[in-house]
Image: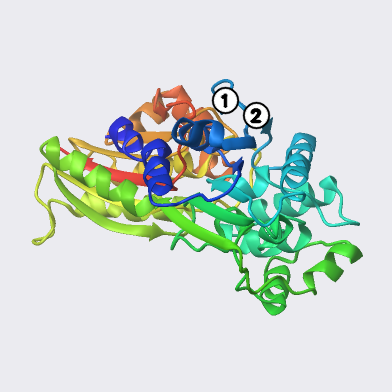
Amino acid sequence: MISRSIEANLPQAAVYNALKEHEFTGSIYLVAIGKAAWNMAEAAQQALGERIKKGIVITKYGHSQGDIPGIEIMEAAHPLSDENTLKGTGKAIDLVKPLGEGDEVLFLISGGGSALFELPQEGVTLDDIVDINSQLLACGADIVEINVIRKRLSQVKAGRFAELCKPAKVFTVVLSDVLGDRLDSIASGPAAPDRFTVQDAADIVKKYDLKLSPRMQELLAQDTPKEISNVETVITGSVKTLCTDAALIAKELGYTPLVMCSGMNCEAREAGRLIASVAASIDNIEFAPKRPCAIIFGGETVVHLKGKGKGGRNQELALAAAEGIEGLKDTVIFSIGSDGTDGPTDAAGGMVDGDTMRKLAEKGIRLGDVLNNNDAYHALKAIDSLIITGPTGTNVNDISVVLCR
C-alpha cells in the first residue's frame, strides 16, 4: 500500500498532463522549488525539451537525481533555510527579472518550497529566518500559521516572486502539501495573492509569544500583495488523491476501505490515540467496516517539541497509537510522510501492532518517557518498526492507516 500509493502520486504524469493543457507562446524559463522539484523539472524538460531556454531547480539535500539538460540544480536545507537557499533563490530572481512581455516562467512548486525558496527582506538575516522558523516549529504552529509569519519577512513569498517576474507571464504547476490546497499557503504563496492580514500575523505572534527583532516587527505590520495579474495556476496532486489511491489499492488487496478524512490537523500523539481507539472499536461497533478492512486518515499533524529526542510527526503518531491497540490481533497502524522524510530523520514514519508494547517493555523502553522526550525514532528503531523509503520524489502530506486482517 505504501509503495503503490506513493507511486500513484509521483509528479511526472501530473506535470505532463498540466503542460498538455497549456499553450506556451513565447520563450520558456523554468523555476522549480521543493522536495519534488527535480522530478517535476525533469518531467517538464522531457515534455518541452529545448523550448526551455534556461532553468533552475532548488530542492532538498539528497533529493536531486542527476543532471537535467539546460537546468541548474541546487540543493539546500529543509526545514530550516541555509546559505544555499539564499544563493539558489537569488539565482532564480536573476533569471526572471530581465524577462520581457513575450516570455513565460514555468514555475513548479512542491512541498518544502517555503524553506527552500527564500531571500529575506532587507534588514532581516538568515539567522533571523532560522530563529523564527525554529520558534514556530517548536511551539507546534501549523503550516498555515508558519507561512503567515515567514512570508512577510521574504522578498519572494506572498506573491512577490510573481511580481518580480513581470511583465513575463507565470504558469504555475503545484503539487499541494497544504490541507485545503490553499495557494497562498503552499510554499508560502510565491505566485499567489495573500489573503491573510496584518492582524492575522499579530494574532499569531501573540498566540505563541514569538520573539521578534524590531525590523521583523516592522515588516509584519506591512501588508502583502492582494492581487496578482500575471499568473495561471494548476494544482496537480494533493492528500485527497493520496487517500483515494490508498483506498483503491487496499480494495484491490482484499480489504474494505474507508477514508475517514483527508484533513487531519491536530497534535500527532492525540491523532495516534484517536486512530488507536478506532482500531480497537472495529469489532465492537455495529456499523463499522468488517475485517478485513483499511481505515485511512490523511492530513498533517503537529508536534510540540518539549524533549530533546529524535523523531517526526508520523513516528510520534504511530508510537502514541501503540498503547491503544495493545494485545489486538491482526491489527496494524502505520503512518508515513509521502515525501519519505519524517522530521529530521531518515525514516518516512513508523508502524505498530498489538505486540509493540511488549517489545518496548522487553527493551526497557517506557512509552511515556519516549513521548515526553519526543524520541519516537530511537524507540521504533529498537523494535525494528521504522518505515524507511528514502526520498520519494513527491510530497502530498501524510497518510495514516489502520489495517485489520
**Residue type marked 1:** Ile
Residue behind mark 1 = 68
Q: Please say if 26 is above or below 147.
A: above
Give the farthest residue toward the bottom: 199
| Mark closest to the chain's N terminus, 2 or 1 | 1
Residue plotted at (47% across, 37% down)? 339
Q: Amino acid at mark 2?
A: Ile
**Residue at the image position 71 percent from the left and 70 percent from the top:** 224
Mark nearer the viewer, 2 or 1: 1
- Give the side of residue 364 with respect to residue 257, left or right: right
Q: Who is closer to the viewer here, 124 or 31?
A: 31
Quarter occupied by the C terminus = top left
Q: Secondary structure at mark 2?
A: strand
Q: Quick check: marks 2 and 1 in contact, CB under 8 Å?
A: yes
Residue 67 higher or lower than 166, as above or below: above
Q: Position of residue 192 (x, y in %)?
A: 59, 63
Q: Residues within 10 Å of mark 1 (few under 14, many from 20)?
A: some
Circle 2 residue: 73
Name the spot of residue 244 as percent of width and height, x first.
26, 50
Q: How much space separates mark 2 and mark 1, taking CA atoms?
A: 8 Å
Q: Quadrant of residue 82?
A: top right
| Mark 2 surroundings within 10 Å by alpha-carbon count, few (fewer than 14), some (14 through 19), many (20 or more) | many
**Residue occupying image coordinates x 80% and y 74%:** 221
